[in-house]
Structure formats: C-alpha cells, structure tokens
Image (spheres, rainbow, N blue to C red):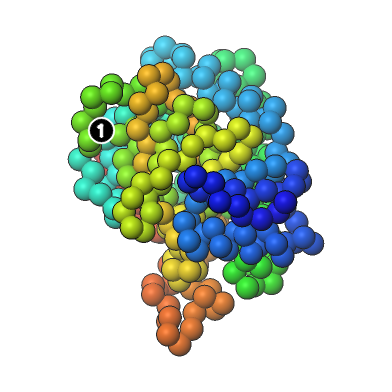
Amino acid sequence: MQNAVPTADLPVIDFGGAPPSSAGAGELARSIDEAFRTVGFCYFANTGIAQSLVDQVFAASRRFHALPMERKLALRINGYHRGYMAPNTSLIETSSVAKVTRPNFSESFMLMHDVAPDEPRYGTPLNGPNQWPEEPADFRADVVAYDAALHAFCVKLLRVVAPALDLPADALDGYFEQPTTFLRLLHYPPQPPDAADDEFGAAPHTDYGFLTILAQDGSGGLSVRRTDGTWLSATPIPDTFVVNVGDMLARWTNGRWQSTPHRVKNLSGGDRYSCPYFFDPNMNAVIAALQSCVASDNPPRFPPVRYGDYLLERLNRNYDYRKQAS
C-alpha cells in the first residue's frame, strides 16, 4: 500500500517494507507530493530501516542523558556545532510563526556529518569531527549505525523526491554530494500541567533545511500547525517516522511544498525522547527555485542562496554558544 491515507491528524505513506527506489517511484512520488503540498508533514511507515537500530539509538540517548551534568558539559557544543546542549541554551529568534521569549526546555546531544582531518573541507564552517563520550558503552557504535541507516535511506529517497517534483530521478543527486547532516538526541523533561502558554520543550518554529526524519517515543507532545492556524497532534504511531519539509526545501520548490510550523510541549508527566535526523544539501550548494516549480504566474520568489550561508545565519542567531563567540 504505497500511498497516502488520512489519519486523524497527518497522512501516512507506506513504503511497503523496503527503502525507496526510483524504479517504483510513481505512486510514492504522488503521495509525497500530495502530503507536502497540503500539510508539509506526514508519517513514513515500513521504510525498511530496522526497528532494532531505532531502539538502540533511543537506548543510547537515554543512557547519555542519564549521565551526571559535569560529564555531559565536558562535551559541550563546540564551534563545529557538535556536542552537548544544556537546557535553556537555545532561543528560536528566527521563528517566523511566533514571538519566542523563552529558551527551549530541552537538552540534546548533536552530531553531524563526520569530517576527517585529511579532507579538503576540514576546518571550514561546520566541517569537523564529532565529539564522543567515553561512556556509555557502545554509545558511539549504536549512534553511528543509526546515522548510517538514515543517511542511506535519505540518499535513496532523493530518487523519489525528484519525480514528486516533476524532475528526472537523479536531478537532485549533485546537491547532496557530501550532504550536511545532523542527528540530534533530544531529551525533554516533563513540564508541569500548569506551565505557562509560552513555555515549550520546543517553541513554535519551522526547520531550516531540506527534510527532517523524526523518530519519537510514545510520550506525545509534538503538534503541527495547519494553514488555518489550528494545531494537529502528531500522535506517535509505532514503527513510523514523522517527516517534514524544511524552509530550504519550501524555498527550493518555490512554495509548492510547505515548511510547516511545529512545537513540542511535554505534558506526559514523564521524560520524552526524540531523535530527529536532518538531511540537507552540501554547504556549497547554490539553491535556486526549481524550474519545474516556476511558471509565468509563479515566478521565483527568492534569489539564489548558498546553503552554508543560509544555515550559518540561522545557527548564529538561535544558539547561545554562537552568540557568545561572536
């Protein structure tokens, strides 16, 4: 059943138990186009990504966040945007959907594409090595295995996304040679039931980049804003990922696909964990409106932009450690 079907909240796209491939892209592409045109969010089911890898990365995240604070702070986030972010250290100033006045009530461990010292791009903005804790045992192996599986899935997904935008299957491949990737291991402590309206685990925002592939636990708390201003719950569905369009992809498609505002309030009474994977173009990729998304009555809405410049501007405004360094 490779199509989008309505649920109470968001469409579900079923991959039939296998990673996407351009050979069977037709129905999948139509489903993805429909979901991203109308909502900008959906669930991916039966992706072929082993549930054991998902379980392992959640277990690794829980073990890491259970460490004493001094051990986590020894890996505090660095100039390459890799490492530990303590609670209340990110304020989403670039939110286009809300006036955010309080920092996010969450903590996270951030990893990106790993860049070795012998690579030519090493040392340029956001191109460096990851930081790793010595403990917990197997943390690095479990996280690397999950990261590799998501990377492989997204590379194949490009061959479905391109036809969804009326492009040849390989049309986007060149933009993702050495892609910019983020894996964020998030922990949301419980918020009190009487928390103020403007207190969030993640304040209303849109994502910066291309696509986000989110694994969430069963706690709930993620909600998505419709174009009419109402909020839908992204209710956890076992063995699925929540997938959404980022700002750069909305810009690239000239508004054909929506980058939809979303937020997190953890009112479950317990801890919430999620693992978003962000798959973005190469830092040097120049993004201009796709010709298949331009028409005489819909000319390009934005000028071309180098992805790395666009990304750095947002990181510099939203994270305390970057403001202090500037």
Is residue 136 shown above or below 233?
Answer: above
Q: Amino acid at mark 1?
A: Glu
Among the 4 quarters of the image, the one containing residue 86? top left
Locate the C terminus by quadrant. top left
What's the residue at 21%, 31% (across, down)? Answer: 196
Q: Position of residue 266 (x, y in %)?
A: 37, 28
Among the 4 quarters of the image, the one containing residue 194? top left
Is residue 198 shown above or below 163?
Answer: above
Q: Residue furthest right?
A: 23
Q: Nearer the viewer, residue 44 or 144?
A: 44
Specify whether residue 140 is in view: no
Q: Position of residue 215 (x, y in %)?
A: 55, 36
Specify whether residue 280 is in view: yes
What's the residue at 75%, 43% (across, down)? Answer: 17
Q: Nearer the viewer, residue 132 or 67?
A: 67
Q: Position of residue 195 (x, y in %)?
A: 24, 27
Left or right of 135, for residue 296: left
Q: Residue furthest top?
A: 68
**Which secondary structure, mark 1?**
loop
Q: Residue furthest bottom?
A: 296
What's the residue at 42%, 50% (across, down)? Answer: 207
The total number of labels drawn is 1
Mark 1 Cα within 10 Å, few/some/many (few <14, many 20+)? some
Left or right of 26, for residue 32: left
Q: Position of residue 131 (x, y in %)?
A: 52, 29
Identify the residue position indicated by label 1 in the image.
199
